[in-house]
Amino acid sequence: MQAKFKKILFAAVVILVAVLAGPPHRAGNAAAENGEPPTKSLPSAVMMENNGAFSLERCIEIALDKNPEIAASKWDIAAADARHDAARSAFWPQISVEGGYQRYVDSQRLIAARYNGEVGVFDDDILRGDLIAKINLYAGGRMMNEASAAGKLSAAEKKKFVRTRDELIYSVAGIYFSILGQQRIIASLAFSQQALDENLKRTTQLYDARKVARVDVLRTEVRLTDLQQNLIREKNALAVQRRILFSLMGYDIVPDDARFEDKLEFSDKTSFGLGGLIETALKNRPDFLAAKERVDAQIMKVSAARAAYWPNVNLVGTYGVRNAPSPGDVGENTQSTEDVGSVGLVLSIPIFDGGQISAKVREEMAALAAARERLKKLELQIRQETETASLDVLSSAERVKATATVIDQARESFRIESLKYEMGKGSLTDVLDAHSAQLQAETTYYRALTDYHTAMARLRLATGENI
């Protein structure tokens, strides 16, 4: 009866250990276990709205939902959180199960004698199963520092994600403004082509009436051909920009009927102080804050490495069974299955490890020095980016204001030169020069306007503000 009870107890221990040793499950991990990002994604984006019209806000929303780099950053956060959980798990009791089979050259006693002269069971083969519980009581602060460092790194990864998101928003905004500017340049070229076509018709009529030379018609045709080539080149640049934008939005193809809401307006709000911008950038930039978190985490890693010099105290408890499947010698009133158990403190003091601990400390200290230097480098980079972006904003704003007043003058000049030529009081050279000046003024204005909006977005990116 006692042997049967011990077999049942042995089976119960094995089942209990199997349950305890199973993979832990935490709420919120179901998505990761199913191969999905652990963070909730944005609502599903509808590709075409309002007959194919895309606003800047809509493009940004779709990009944040579908861009692969954003998804990868979410997985990086999940990995950092998992490492943090793994570090914190060291504070909990470690429960494991061990089982084994051993065959000896000479028969061994199944369990140790409990008093002098106790009879026992001997066998060449011993089966064992143990449930082991281990609790760390003291580790010199190693576990605390490792968990804190992992928490800092997890926070840094989240700040890095914010920076990645901001950079994506800036990229989308920059290419969106470039598309708007390119569309206006193409419209200007198309209008100029139409005007030059009309001019060619009038020149041809004047030539047929023997009022101008044939060379005027040829020169107008050459200029018109050059304008057509420019139009083809600008349309190709627009197609490339559209491809880049939809790639950022996570789409494989570019819809033919996609249109973009034109918001390329100029609002001269360029009064700011450089010192205040730099202070704002150092306070708000997620990548700078993440670098600080990494420095703090590395400080804790150094402390964790130094903790290896200190003693390590563990409370260890075991309970299990031993079984002799084919005993060669069975004492009177003994069983071939016995239970064993123990509990005690284990003290471990490092005496000599060949310099492994000191090497690890030096490694972490070197990594700390490198992290501090990278933080300093990033601070200098932020100062340079902020100053450059602010100068670009001021420069592009002045260019916009300077070229805005020229466009109307250039158009009027072209109209006057065309009338003078028709009345025989001007030359074709003056007409073509006026037309080139008008086209150049419009092109310069739209490029400056595009540069202004892009520079404003880059300034907000440099200072860590919402784009």
Image (cartoon, grey):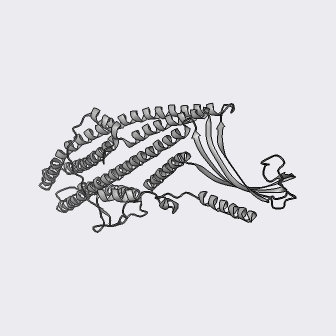
Residue 17 in view, yes or no: yes
Residue 222: x percent and y percent? 30, 55
Image quarter of residue 188: bottom left
What residue is shown at x 31% (from left), y 59% (from top)? 58
Instruction: Work out whether residue 394 or residue 305 is closer to the camera in this orientation and state it.
Output: 305
Instruction: Work out whether residue 143 or residue 113 is closer to the camera in this orientation and state it.
Output: 113
Residue 109: x percent and y percent? 82, 52
What residue is shown at x 39% (from left), y 34% (from top)? 379
Residue 113: x percent and y percent? 80, 48
Q: Is residue 390 left or right of residue 134?
A: left
Residue 321: x percent and y percent? 72, 56
- For this orientation, the residue located farthest to the bottom is 51
Q: Is residue 360 left or right of residue 298?
A: right
Count of numbered badges drawn on the protein:
0
Q: Quadrant of the N terminus?
A: bottom right
What residue is shown at x 54% (from left), y 41% (from top)? 143
Instruction: Work out whether residue 387 or residue 200 is closer to the camera in this orientation and state it.
Output: 387
What residue is shown at x 85% (from left), y 59% (from top)? 327
Relative to 362, is 25 above or below? below
Q: Is residue 270 left or right of residue 367?
A: left
Instruction: Work out whether residue 16 or residue 66 is closer to the camera in this orientation and state it.
Output: 16
Relative to 192, is 404 above or below? above
Residue 129 in view, yes or no: no
